[in-house]
């Protein structure tokens, strides 16, 4: 058995693409638009060869999607957890669980999907402002 992809529904394609592509550096590798079904499937890779995230855009949808109880989060390794969190914060993304331990943080996509960000390799030494920053919201 081979893992193929994870799918998340997004309400606003432009906001989702900004978050994943512009802020996190994902690359669009495939797209399928269905005129008949009125939806788009956008496949994004975080790194070449990794299983993609499939963003599903149902055209004309205006109601926010509810949180699924069976879904937890997507997780990605980042080169520098502090730099990544600082860049996201500078772009208006709330750091819900700061990387106090130099290892792990949680943020949410514009559609409320939790992303766990993990330091690639060894944890970084605890550093401010992260070490004393409280968690906020839910993730």
Image (cartoon, rainbow, N blue to C red):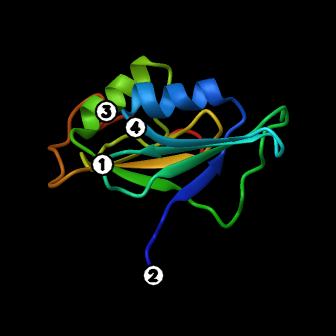
Q: Does label 1 or label 4 sit earlier along the sequence?
A: 4
Image coordinates for residue 124, horizontal then vertical, percent? 16, 45
- In the picture of the structure, the residue carrying the numbered disc 4 is 26
* Within-10-Å neighbours for mark 1: few <14, some 14–19, many 20+: few
Image coordinates for residue 31, horizontal then vertical, percent? 57, 41
Residue 94 visible, this orientation: no
- In the picture of the structure, the residue carrying the numbered disc 2 is 1
* Within-10-Å neighbours for mark 3: few <14, some 14–19, many 20+: some
Q: Is residue 33 left or right of residue 43?
A: right
Q: Quadrant of the N terminus?
A: bottom left
CA–CA distance in space, label 2 to label 1: 20 Å
Q: Residue at x 31, y 47 (%)?
A: 47
In this rendered view, identify the residue nearer to me: 71 or 41: 41
Q: Secondary structure at mark 2?
A: loop
CA–CA distance in space, label 4 to label 2: 25 Å
Q: Does label 3 or label 4 sit earlier along the sequence?
A: 4
Q: Residue at x 27, y 40 (%)?
A: 81
Label at residue 84: 3
Q: Quadrant of residue 111?
A: top right
* Within-10-Å neighbours for mark 4: few <14, some 14–19, many 20+: many
Label at residue 58: none
Label at residue 48: 1
* Within-10-Å neighbours for mark 2: few <14, some 14–19, many 20+: few
Q: Does label 3 or label 1 sit earlier along the sequence?
A: 1
Q: Quadrant of residue 133?
A: top left
For residue 139, above or below residue 93? below
């Amino acid at each position: 058995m081979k893992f193929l992809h994870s799918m998340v529904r997004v309400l606003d394609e432009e906001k989702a693409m900004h978050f994943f592509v512009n802020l996190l550096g994902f690359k669009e590798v495939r797209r399928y638009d269905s005129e008949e079904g009125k939806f788009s499937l956008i496949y994004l890779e975080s790194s070449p060869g990794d299983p993609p995230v499939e963003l599903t855009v149902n055209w004309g949808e205006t109601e926010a999607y509810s949180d699924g109880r069976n879904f937890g989060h997507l997780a990605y390794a980042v080169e520098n957890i502090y730099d990544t969190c600082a860049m996201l914060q500078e772009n208006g993304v709330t750091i819900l669980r700061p990387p106090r331990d130099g290892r792990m943080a949680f943020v949410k996509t514009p559609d409320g999907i939790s992303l766990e960000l993990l330091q690639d390799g060894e944890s970084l030494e605890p550093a401010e402002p992260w070490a004393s920053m409280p968690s906020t919201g839910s993730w």
